[in-house]
Image (spheres, helix red, strand yellow):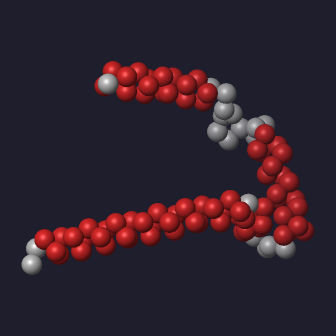
């Protein structure tokens, strides 16, 4: 079973390193995000969103559902952690008078 785990790990690492070769270089001014997406947000965000800050306009208006989803996931993880830790502390109190 351990060999199978290592084999899967090595295969996944190979796939990730192979796929990383197709990514643009960091800071490449000719990459698609820098030539298509960023200029569009910078030029049109104030007119389309009314937000004075471009980052706020992108996060709140263009990517609002995505940001809401991320917030829900983090909130759920926090509540689950608190419930688990609270459950564990009450179990310890029951075992130790």
* Quadrant holding the C terminus: bottom left
5 to 53, vertically: above or below:
above
Task: List x then y, in percent, for residue 79.
Answer: 44, 70
Image coords of residue 85 (percent x, y)? 31, 68
Residue pictured at 76% horizontal, 38% vertical: 31
Tell me, yes or no, if residue 49 can be seen here: yes
Residue 54: name its quadrant: bottom right
- Taking the image as shown, residue 52 lies to the left or right of residue 86, namely right
Whether residue 55 is visible? no
Residue at the spot 43% in from the left edge and 27% down from the top edge? 9
Residue at 71% in and 62% down = 65
* Closer to the camera in the image, 92 or 39: 92
Q: In the rendered image, which quarter contains the N terminus?
A: top left
Which sits in the foreground, 43 or 11? Answer: 11
Q: Where is residue 90 in the image (x, y as percent from the top left)?
A: 24, 74
Most extreme residue toward the left is: 97
Q: Quadrant of residue 78?
A: bottom left
55 over 40 or under it: above or below: below
Q: How many labels does the image show?
A: 0
Q: Which residue is drawn at 17% across and 75% down?
A: 93
Of 85 and 19, nearer the camera is 85
């Amino acid at each position: 079973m351990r060999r199978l785990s290592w084999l899967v790990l090595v295969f996944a690492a190979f796939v990730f390193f192979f796929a990383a070769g197709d990514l643009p270089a960091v800071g490449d001014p000719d990459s698609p995000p820098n030539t298509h997406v960023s200029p569009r947000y910078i030029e049109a965000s104030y007119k389309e969103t009314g937000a004075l800050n471009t980052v706020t306009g992108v996060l709140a208006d263009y990517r609002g559902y995505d940001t809401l989803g991320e917030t829900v996931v983090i909130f759920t993880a926090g509540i689950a952690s608190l419930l688990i830790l609270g459950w564990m502390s009450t179990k310890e109190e029951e075992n130790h008078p």
